[in-house]
Amino acid sequence: MNLLNTFKTAIGALIANKKRAGLTILGIIIGIAAVIIIISVSQGAQSIILNQVKALGAKTILVEPGREPKGPSDASEILSNSLKLADYEVLLQKNNNPYIDNATAFVMSSAHILYQNKEERASLAGVMPSYQAINNFYPVEGRFITDDESKTGANVIVLGDTIKNDIFGLSNAIGETVRIKNKRFRIIGVMDRKGAAVGGLDYDKQVFVPIKTAQDMLGIKHVNIIMLTATETEYIQTAADDIKRILRQRHGIINPDNDDFHVITQEDIANTLSLITSVLTILLGSVAAISLIVGGIGIMNIMLVSVAERTQEIGLRKSVGATNKNILLQFLLEAIILTLLGGIIGIIIGISFSAFIAFIMNQLDYSWDLIIPIYSLFLSSGVASFIGLVFGIYPAKAASKLNPIDALRYE
Amino acid sequence: MIKIENIIKEYQDEDINTVALNGINFKIDDGEFVAITGPSGSGKSTMMHILGLLDRPTKGKFYLDDRDTSKYNDEQLALLRNQKVGFIFQAFNLLKKTSIFDNVRLPLQYNPDIKQGDIDYLAGLAIEAVGITHRKNHLTNQLSGGEQQRAAIARALVNSPSLILADEPTGNLDTKNSMQTMDIFTDLNKKGQTIIIVTHEPDIAAYAKRNIQMKDGKIIDDIKT
């Protein structure tokens, strides 16, 4: 019997048992769709993170006080007051640090904002004008804090988009006065919408005051973060090394283990976050792969039932001249057709569902890229065919080895 | 031509040894019409399975057209079954949910010497020979018992085998259909076809020209009429 006839026979047998075949491939469909969806969703999540890191600017370098945290509960960086405005000024000087283009320092805290009888909780940032360019974040109404105001500590405030809307709704806020800790602040501007950043900070829930004003209110002399941008992406590492050298010199540190600050580049952040999502992808992918194997065992089970149910048919085929090879091929083809069919349907469902998730996420204003790596299609369909072969061979072999007369007599 | 030499068939079932055939010898020439008869348990069905190459004897030799079949492996036996033997069963053994045409095509599809383009033509001829052309495209379960047995005969004939074996071919049929089936065998035999049937009904055995009677795994009589 040639391959075409065997193929037709296998298809015929599957059509004759539609329900059973349908239930069998369901396992494979779910497994394959799950693999594709999981890979696509984790790639999409990664794209959100990477897009945000990109939005921050690939040339950005952060300097935070305290040595590099050794773990999530290491609070040394928050408690440290080692970074001063003077450090920022020195770092900005071109002759010290030729690869630095721009820099800003700021203080972070939280505050209750009072307006008439309304009270709103916000993140308070004490900033200087360079904050805007480095964060690519500008006011849509009014103006930002000037250099003069940040040095003298004027009582002016710029509101984030969410805070403005919560307090004032659609009415004008510029020129109004709000109170923080019994101090009166004149609203001079409202920031553009920016959304949430990596690490959970919501840019739109911030209010901005001059850095000196914030330091005076909090009773501190230090700054929480110095943010710098390198002149070119390729100089980031050199610039970071220069920063470390300058700060160690200023702080009198000889052994780098005693650093009272740490430097973070965007690359570090991107790498860390990519690592997290990659680990998640592998983890969830393995779970999906297990479901593929379960689907494969389902195929084997059904094929075994099918062989048992069709023992008489096998006997008859043998009695009219089918060889062991003919029978083996027929049952193997049935298993392969089942898995391939399941594979194709699974891929279609997987891609559609991934596209649906991407659509929803974009509707929710996340910059979610629809990524369906080709390898995920090959991986899932490859695994499915492999499973079809592996789990199909055993029942097919069992069928082919039946003695014709025993098979014919089988009840 | 068939030559059976000292065939012994034993079954081993949970340490109990059953002898189904105990030293059988006979020869059947081309063109003979033979009935193998005997009570149940006489070994006639086992004999039939060995003649049909569906089962191997424990000892002894079976020559089919001068070929020593004991030396054949599974694949070679499958080819011999396909080209040399047409088997007809008591329960017809047609494929369910399958058309008569496809059932009759089956042995041709397994025959490596038949061209793909000839399959439909040859299957059509065989179906015509048993007079059920009008039922060609019907499914197995849409046919009466007599029609099903004719389809099974067409399937047995389709590869022009040198030997037709029928195991209780009328066992599931009424008298009228039994007679029609036996008439088909008689006609085929007249055209030179070698036929061996196994039956326990004397009036069916009477259609044959030679009657081999078996009892307890042995031949007790061999009568030519």
Image (cartoon, coloured by chain):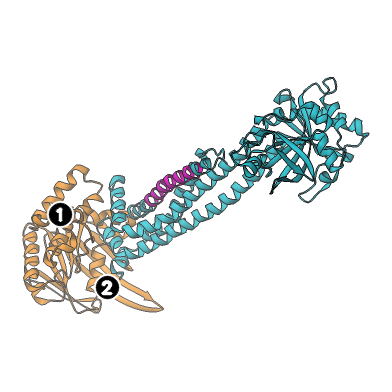
Chain colours: A cyan, B orange
Q: Which residue is mark 1?
A: B137
The amino acid at mark 2 is Gly
* Whole-percent x, y for residue B115 in the image: 21, 43
Q: Specify the subunit that label 2 lies on.
A: B
Q: Which of the 4 quarters of the picture holds residue A204?
A: top right
Q: Is residue A352 magenta?
A: yes
Is residue A58 shown above or below A282? above
* Residue drawn at point x = 20 percent, y = 56 percent: B103
Q: Is residue A211 magenta?
A: no
Decide which of tag 2 and tag 1 comes sooner along the chain.
2
- Of B51 and A38, the residue lying toward us: A38
- Of B135 and A236, the residue lying toward us: A236
Is residue A196 shown above or below A153? below
* Residue drawn at point x = 27 percent, y = 73 percent: B23
- Of A264 and B183, the residue lying toward us: A264
Q: Which residue is mark 2?
A: B23
- Of B205 and A269, the residue lying toward us: A269
* Whole-percent x, y for residue B120 in the image: 16, 47
Left or right of A324? Residue B163 is left
Quarter of the figure with the C terminus of chain A: bottom left
User: For the residue carrying disc 2, how many other residues have a C-alpha within 10 Å: few (<14), some (14-19), or many (20+)?
Assistant: some
Bounds of the magenta segment: A336-358
Query: The residue tagged with tag 2: helix, strand or loop?
Result: strand
- Cα distance between the residues tagged 2 and 1: 46 Å
